[in-house]
Amino acid sequence: MHIPHTIYTDGGTVHGKTQALERWRRYVPQCEFLRYDLSALLVGKDIAAAEISLIYRHRKTGVALETTKANFWTFEAGWPIQMTEYFDLNGVAALTRSLGLYGGSRQTRRPKACPSYA
């Protein structure tokens, strides 16, 4: 998993599920999930794909952020053998900025914060 240093000071590449989970465990407790919608799910014989819509609210600042991620799985004999995950980096940048972790000046597009959800 790679998060560019331009959007997060602790960015870079992590390898494997353990390193990726360690990174996310630092942020998730700081946020409240308002929506986690994976209704856009496609399943085939040896593949599956999901587009997941999320809305987070940063607990300390109250900033609500909307983002989307996509997961693609490959199966062999009914077992998952590979997963590829894509994130909306503009959404991740907005989240890291709200956490005070924004790390660069080369961001080309400003991420949009969604309206505050009461």
Image: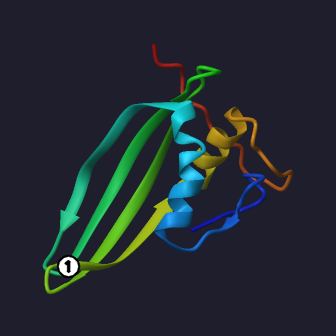
Residue at position x 55%, y 50% in the image: 24
In this rendering, position of residue 29 left or right of residue 75: right
Q: Relative to 76, is 69 above or below? A: above
Single out the residue that lies furthest toward the bottom.
77
Q: Relative to 107, is 19 above or below? A: below
Residue at position x 38%, y 44% in the image: 53
Residue at position x 53%, y 19% in the image: 116
Q: Relative to 36, is 45 above or below? A: below
Single out the residue that lies furthest toward the top.
118
Residue at position x 26%, y 53% in the image: 40
Disc 1, SS: strand
Q: Amino acid at mark 1?
A: Trp
Q: Nearer the viewer, residue 19 or 78?
A: 19
Pinpoint residue 17: horizontal percent, then vertical percent: 47, 67
Single out the residue that lies furthest toward the right.
105
| Residue 65 makes an appearance in the image | no
Disc 1 residue crowd, few under 14, some 14–19, many 20+, Cα 10 Å: few
Pinpoint residue 32: horizontal percent, then vertical percent: 47, 29
